[in-house]
Every structure is written in structure tokens, then in C-alpha cells.
Image (spheres, rainbow, N blue to C red):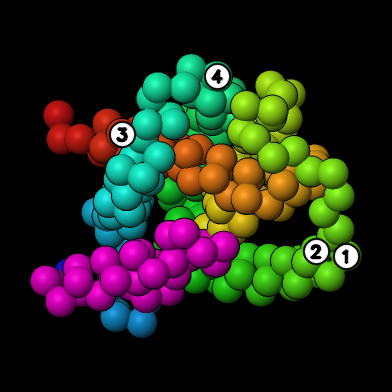
Amino acid sequence: MNFLDVIILGIVEGITEFLPISSTGHLILASHLLGLNQTGFLKSFEIAIQLGAILSVVVLYGRSLLINAAVLKRVFVAFAPTAIFGLVFYNTIKKSLLGDSNVVLWSLFLGGIFLIIFEIVHREKDAQEEIISITYPQALLIGVFQSVAMIPGVSRSAATIVGGLMIGLKRKTIVEFSFLLAVPTMGAATALDLMKNASP
């Protein structure tokens, strides 16, 4: 992987991170198109590079996340399922799924169909408007939805937003909550991968 490859992957990450189209999936496809071998280093790079985009969330929403204890508690309750599943299935995801373009393509295809159907049938009525109105059971359910995005090609933001809409949240509320939830999720994913792959 040369410097130009890094720039191209950085652009792909920047464009896709906050859209419901799976930045990880697009990074894997971009790497494939660039002719890069899916080595352990590249897989780790595709995880860690997302941390850069997440820093923008810290800048924009850091005050809400760090100062408002009620919001912080809900974010970490929602983070819990992904943390648990991530620890349990890390090896399977890293070795068998991450880097597999077929898994990515099928996930993007089926996920795209699901999103189209969902947008057609979903009706937003009497939705909750504030993050602090999210109950802890609701936050936990959002976290379960986010866990599905451990499959490469499944968008983390789309999974959490759809989950939030299904349990009655207002679109603006769940989008903001999804951004906040990205901070511990991507931070922990990067830290776990670095620890697992650190040289002795």
C-alpha cells in the first residue's frame, strides 16, 4: 500500500462514514479495486482509519456527550451489546468476514433493498424528540441493531437509525444518537484491534 492508496482510501472513508452505506464495506471494495491484498495490516488499517472521521463527531457533539451525564449513560448502554459481541466474535469477523468482497456485495445489495422497503412503509408518528427521552431498554435495543453492522457491508449508521425509527424515535434524534454512539464504538474497535495485533 503506497501513499496514493492511503489518500484514496481516506477519501472513500470521509465520504461514506456518515452515510448509511457502510464505510467499511466501501473501503474493502476500494482496496480490492486498487489491487491491495487483504493482509492483516490492511484489515487493521480499514478499522483504524474510521477513527479519524469519528473525531469530527467529538468536535461537533463532544459537549453533549461529555457534559450531559444522562446522554452519556444512554450511549454506553447502547454500546454494550456491540462491545460484548465484538469481543466474542472478533476472530471470526477479522479472519473470515472482513476483507471478503462477496460478503460486502451481498450485504450492500440486501441492505439497500431493505432500506428502500423500510422507507416506503415507515411512518413517523408521535416520535420521541430528545435523546434524554430514550429509555435504557430502547438504548439497549439500538445497540443490538448496531451489532448487526459487525458484518462487513452492513452500515452501522443505517442499522442504528432503522432500529431507532422502529422503536419510535424521531429521525433527527436517532441520527444524532447514532453519531454519538459511533465514538465509543469505533474507539473501542480500533483499540481492540491494535491490542490484538500489537507486536510482542
Single out the mark in the foreground, 3 or 4. 4
* Residue 78 higher or lower than 122, as above or below: above
Residue under label 3? 191
Residue under label 2? 118
Real-space Cα separation, disc 3 to disc 4, in angstroms: 25 Å
Q: Secondary structure at mark 4?
A: helix
Q: Secondary structure at mark 1?
A: helix
Q: Amino acid at mark 3?
A: Ala
Single out the mark in the foreground, 1 or 3. 1
Q: Is residue 8 magenta?
A: yes
Q: Residues within 10 Å of mark 1 (few under 14, many from 20)?
A: few
Precedes in sequence: disc 3 or disc 4: 4
| Residues marked 2 and 4 touching at CB (< 8 Å) | no
| Residues marked 2 and 1 touching at CB (< 8 Å) | yes
**Of 44 and 141, which appears nearest the observer?**
141
Residue under label 4? 70
* Residue 77 higher or lower than 7, as above or below: above
| Residues marked 1 and 3 touching at CB (< 8 Å) | no
Single out the mark in the foreground, 2 or 3. 2
Q: Residues within 10 Å of mark 3 (few under 14, many from 20)?
A: some
Q: Is residue 21 magenta?
A: yes
Q: Amino acid at mark 2?
A: Phe
Precedes in sequence: disc 4 or disc 1: 4
Residue under label 1? 121
Q: How many marks?
A: 4
Q: Amino acid at mark 1?
A: Val
| Location of the N terminus (image quadrant) | bottom left
Query: Which of the 4 image quadrants contains residue 59?
Result: top left
Precedes in sequence: disc 2 or disc 4: 4
Real-space Cα separation, disc 4 to disc 1, in angstroms: 32 Å
Q: Main secondary structure of the magenta part?
A: helix
Left or right side of 136 for 5: left
